[in-house]
Amino acid sequence: MAIKVHGSPMSTATMRVAACLIEKDLDFELVPVDMVSGEHKKHPYLSLNPFGQVPAFEDGDLKLFESRAITQYIAHVYADNGYQLILQDPKKMPIMSVWMEVEGQKFEPHASKLTWELGIKPIIGMTTDDDAVKESEVQLSKVLDIYETRLAESKYLGGDSFTLVDLHHIPNIYYLMSTKVKEVFDSRPRVSAWCADILARPAWVKGLEKLQK
Amino acid sequence: MAIKVHGSPMSTATMRVAACLIEKDLDFELVPVDMVSGEHKKHPYLSLNPFGQVPAFEDGDLKLFESRAITQYIAHVYADNGYQLILQDPKKMPIMSVWMEVEGQKFEPHASKLTWELGIKPIIGMTTDDDAVKESEVQLSKVLDIYETRLAESKYLGGDSFTLVDLHHIPNIYYLMSTKVKEVFDSRPRVSAWCADILARPAWVKGLEKLQK
């Protein structure tokens, strides 16, 4: 049975899962969820994701939600397909896991707030909350200072090769590179080079094309 | 070499790691970090956790931070010790992983805010922000509505047995049970029974004793 991703092309979490599937050379059907009419907040969609958010994921009988749980499932179950997104060395995997948590707990809260305020609100005609932007920018800068140091000792955040850790960051960075927050990334040379590198992944470029078709 | 946990008895993240180690019957040394004097924001502690937060973890040469990455390391590497905290069935593990992300992404932001405002600020002589409490209580209630439904179909959040998913919740719930937010848990019968169950885990009780000694 085919893999299905129920989601929206604008959603960073949908983008995250699509990029992961393409890195793994896996074919999938994108099932559009009409967020304008609130389809994600109603049944039957809520049976796929009780939090009423996108994406929801189906692989045969298995139904999952939460983008980072989905990407981990894909990376582990399809370990032999496409690009290897996890470090299997037992000494390196726990370090990758640390930086995976850093993305979810430290980067995501501020980056997603900025993506919402500066990347998405203008598109859907809402007014940006400048105070929220200022606060999130300060917090994100602190995180990126630590990334700058980390990237001096390791080519990628999770280790020496591109992994799920880096992939999880891409969708927010993609949005923020078209906003004034680009400066916060660009002013840190290693972070800036890392952003350019991960945004140039062919799987990411192909994922964007597939979503925006 | 012995396992070391650098942390503070008041910290929910330190508690999370301690409870996990005790569930796994692993001995460890608790190395106190003096947060009052800001030891966690200075070198050499920053070499253990660049974010300047507790805990930091050492198992021989391996140094980790981020409590959820540490517990995952312990649960996987010491799979054969003590209580089995992960579901190894390949159909059940991805579902556990979904609910692990739910804890980190949906429960933790609101629960930790409430723990800080109502559980910790009064102890350290700071003033509670009532607006922040009100907002977080509303958001936490929505999450607990979904937990109430989930717990109708599954005895524990991650599956039929107690796993890391439930364990990750315990420290915030422990604090919140001594605050007015207890009502938000108690008004949902399945959530209330689940809280009573997981707070009564002997490993949790033993962990609290060890931390508070």
Image (spheres, coloured by chain):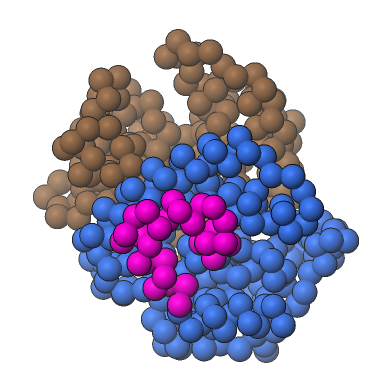
Chain colours: A brown, B blue
- Residue B111 falls within the magenta-colored stretch: no
Q: Left or right: A167 with respect to B133?
A: left
Q: Is B123 in front, or is A25?
A: B123
Residue furthest toward the left? A1
Q: Quadrant of residue B62?
A: bottom right
Q: Position of residue B154 (x, y in %)?
A: 25, 64
Q: Position of residue A146 (x, y in %)?
A: 72, 48
Question: Who's the residue at 69% across and 25% down the image?
Answer: A134
The overriding secondary structure of the stretch rendered in magenta is helix
Q: Is A77 in front, or is B147?
A: B147
Q: Left or right: A207 with respect to B199?
A: left
Q: Position of residue A167 (x, y in %)?
A: 47, 45
Asked if residue B101 is positioned above or below residue A208 in the image, the reply reads below
Question: Who's the residue at 25% across and 20% down the image?
Answer: A37
Question: Who's the residue at 34% across and 55% down the image?
Answer: B188
Residue furthest toward the top? A125
Q: Is residue A166 visible?
A: no
Q: Is B171 in front, or is B77?
A: B171
Question: Who's the residue at 84% across and 61% down the image?
Answer: B36
For the C terminus of chain B, which image quadrant? bottom right
Residue furthest toward the right? B37
Asked if residue B110 is positioned above or below residue B14 in the image, the reply reads above
Asked if residue A1 is positioned above or below residue A16 in the image, the reply reads below
Q: Is residue B154 visible?
A: yes
Q: Quadrant of residue A9?
A: top left
Give the number of callouts. Answer: 0
Q: What range of the chain is rendered magenta?
A: B172-200
- Residue B175 falls within the magenta-colored stretch: yes
For the N terminus of chain B, which image quadrant? bottom right
Q: Position of residue B128 (x, y in %)?
A: 69, 44
Q: Is B153 in front, or is A176?
A: B153
